[in-house]
Image (spheres, rainbow, N blue to C red):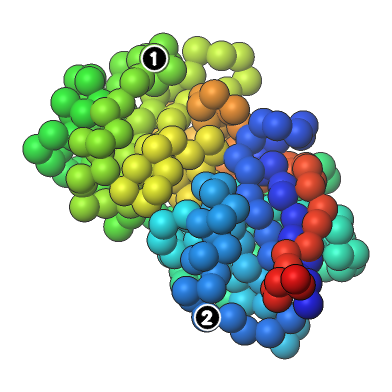
Amino acid sequence: MTIPMFHVDAFTDRPFAGNPAAVCILSSARDASWMQAVAADMNLSETAFLLREGTGFRLRWFTPKVEVDLCGHATLASAHVLWREIGLPADEPLTFATRSGVLTATRRESLIELDFPREPASDAAAPPGLLDALGLAPTYVGRNRFDYLIEVTAEEVVKSLEPDFTALGRLAVRGVIVTSRSTSPGVDFVSRFFAPGAGINEDPVTGSAHCCLGPYWQQRLNKNTFVAHQVSARGGVVHVRVLEQRVILGGQAVTVVRGELCDKVVR
């Protein structure tokens, strides 16, 4: 028995950039321990598992270490696979039942757009060890239900960060977002995302972090639509539209590998 599996680079229009995700198309429900074992073996920042439920899909996301409540790039990768690889009609929206409620994906010109919840940050004190682990002096510290949000003075500060991942991994949060305004033409803000406690020292492009970044920069830049660049080594672009209760995340994706997961070993 085999399970269709795809390796997709998300939030990019070219291979070997953006954020890689594995996408598994299940024909029956599997337990969490099996999915976690697959994700550990794939050793990508996220592995997505899709199971048809009625007119939509059940979607779960796993890092190599833990199941997560919200993931943007693996949802984008999943939508790309269902439309491009499985052949579902591209003019029909996709619906995903997840641990963060019902999420939808639609096509808008060259972009896949994801309808995600707003996850704004509130002012917070930096916990002991956070700023030392990052090696910076922030202009703002906040926190939402997932992550700490840190604003710094300049794009070059974001790009030059070399965090102490061991120290960051001790924090009782999913991850840390570091952001600044951008000095690059056509880009509104930049960010990087660190989540060693979830098994990912640095996530290349983090869609769910932009559910926090969008509302944050909406207040500071007095606008609702943004082009964001996550300035990791791989890099990626996220188009962000902030609505009253939701955030729309737009991006592209590229299939890198098509294959099958062997569900039972043949000796």
Amino acid at the residue labelled 2? Asp
Query: In the displayed structure, does residue 82 sit left or right of residue 208?
Result: right
User: What element does badge 1 sit on?
Assistant: helix
In this rendering, the answer to whether 93 lies above or below 21 is below
Q: CA distance from mark 2 to mark 1?
A: 41 Å
The crowding category of the residue bearing disc 2, from other C-alpha atoms within 10 Å (few below 14, some 14 to 19, many at least 20), is few
Say whether residue 185 is visible.
yes
User: What element does badge 2 sit on?
Assistant: loop
Q: Position of residue 35 (x, y in %)?
A: 55, 69
Residue drawn at 16 percent across, 26 percent down: 132
Which residue, given by chain and number where applicable, does mark 1 sit on?
A: 160
Pick out the residue farthest to the front.
267
Name the quadrant containing residue 125: top left
Residue drawn at 80 percent across, 57 percent down: 259
Residue drawn at 79 percent across, 47 percent down: 257
Amino acid at the residue labelled 1? Ser
Q: How many marks are shown on the rendered structure?
A: 2
Which residue, given by chain and number where applicable, does mark 2 sit on?
A: 31
The quarter of the image holding the C terminus is bottom right
Residue drawn at 41 percent across, 61 percent down: 66
In this rendering, the answer to whether 113 lies above or below 228 is below
